[in-house]
Image: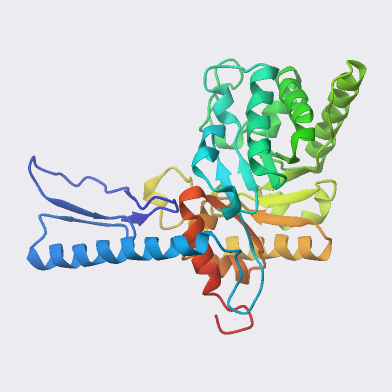
Amino acid sequence: MWRCWRAVPAVVGIGDNTLASGDMVLLDGVKGEIAIDPDASERAAFEAARLGYLKGRQAAQTHARRQAATRDGVAVKVMVNIADPGEVDAIAVGHVDGVGLMRTEFLFGDGLPDEEKQYAAYARVLDWAQGRPVTIRTVDAGGDKPVPGFTQEEANPFLGVRGIRLCLARPDVFMVQVRALLRAAPRGNLRVMLPMVSVPAEIDQSLAIFAEAAKSLEGEGIAHAMPPIGIMVEVPSVAVTPERFSRAAFFSIGSNDLTQYVLAASRDNWRLSQIARADDPSVLALIARVAAHGAANARDVSLCGDAASDPLLVPALLRAGLRSLSVASSSIGEVKAAISGCDLSGSG
C-alpha cells in the first residue's frame, strides 16, 4: 500500500482486494496499510498507534506558533498553500511566513472568470496576509485540470498545452488574469508565479504581456503595480539548467510534477506509487541543484509541492539546501516540529 505525500494520511491503490459487507477494516494512512478482519492483537496495536498519532499531532501544534528553526539555529520559512481564498479564515496569519502558493484554478471551475471576480479573490488574500508575501500562481489549467472553453482534449495532456503554454496560446484569457493581478498588487506583498515553464522564451513572452497590461491600466488611470514574477520548477529542463532562467525573480519547486517528469511515472497511477517518490536520489539531486543556484545568485528558492508537507521528508529537503517550504495548512505544526528536530551541522 502507498503512503500518499498528502497532509491527510491516506491509503490508495489497494488493488483488487474484495471486502464483504460487515467486514472490519483498519486503515493506517501513515504506514500506508490496511488490515481486513483484524484479530485482537492487531486491533490493540492499531489503537495504540492511533492514539500516538493524535498525541503527536497535538504536540506539534505548539510549534505552529513559533518561528521555524533547526536544532542548530538555521532559520526556515514555513509558508502555506491555499486553493481557495476562504481557506485563510481558518489559518492564523501569525503561524506562517506568508502564502507560498495560491492556486487560481478554483476561479475557473465554472468557466472563464471576469477581471472583477479575480481581483476580489486576490485582494482578499493579500489583505489577510498583512504584508507577508503572497505568491499567486497563474492558472495552471490543462493536464488533469480541464476548463470548459479554455483547455482542449489531448492524447497526452500532461505533456501537452497546459500551464503557461496554454496561457500564452490564449492571451485573451491570460490578459484578464494579468490585469487583475496587477490591480491587486498595491494591496500587499504580491509575487506572481508562472507554472509549467520549460524554456526561457516563455518567461520573456509572459513578461511582455504583463508590461502590456500595465501600460493599458496606466492609460485607463487604474491603480496597479508590477510584482516580482517567478516560475515553478517542475520540468527537468529548468532544474538541470536553472541558470538559463535568470529572468525569473524567484523559483518555487513543484515536487509533484518534477517527480513525475524525472522518473517518467504518472503521479495519478497508483501502480507506480513506489517509483514516483520525491525522495528518490535523482529528484533530491535536482532540488539541491536549484537550491544551490538560488543561493549563489540571490534568487529565492522554495518548495510548494506535497513533499514539503511530509514531516518525514523535511530533513532531506533541508539537507538539499532548501530554507523555505510551503505546506498544507493542516501540516504547519508538524512541519515546524520536524524542522526543529533537524541538525544541519552534520549529525541531524
Q: Nearer the viewer, residue 161 or 212?
A: 212
Q: Nearer the viewer, residue 44 or 130?
A: 130
Q: Is residue 239 visible?
A: yes
The N terminus - image quarter: bottom left
**Where in the figure is residue 59, as x and y percent of width and height?**
40, 65
Is 324 placed left or right of 206 in the picture? left
Q: Nearer the viewer, residue 128 or 204?
A: 128
Residue 173 lies, with reference to residue 203, above or below; the image says above
Colouring mode (rainbow / by chain / secondary structure / one colour): rainbow
* Displayed quadrant of residue 157: top right
Residue drawn at x 8%, y 62% is 39
Residue 345 lies, with reference to residue 22, above or below; the image says below
**Where in the figure is residue 339, as x and y percent of width and height?**
55, 68
Is 103 placed left or right of 31 in the picture? right
* Displayed quadrant of residue 211: top right
**Where in the figure is residue 105, as x and y percent of width and height?**
57, 30
**Where in the figure is residue 53, as x and y percent of width and height?**
32, 63
Q: Is residue 234 visible?
A: no
Is 214 placed left or right of 39 in the picture? right
Residue drawn at x 27%, y 49% is 14
Counting every numbered tag in the picture gives 0
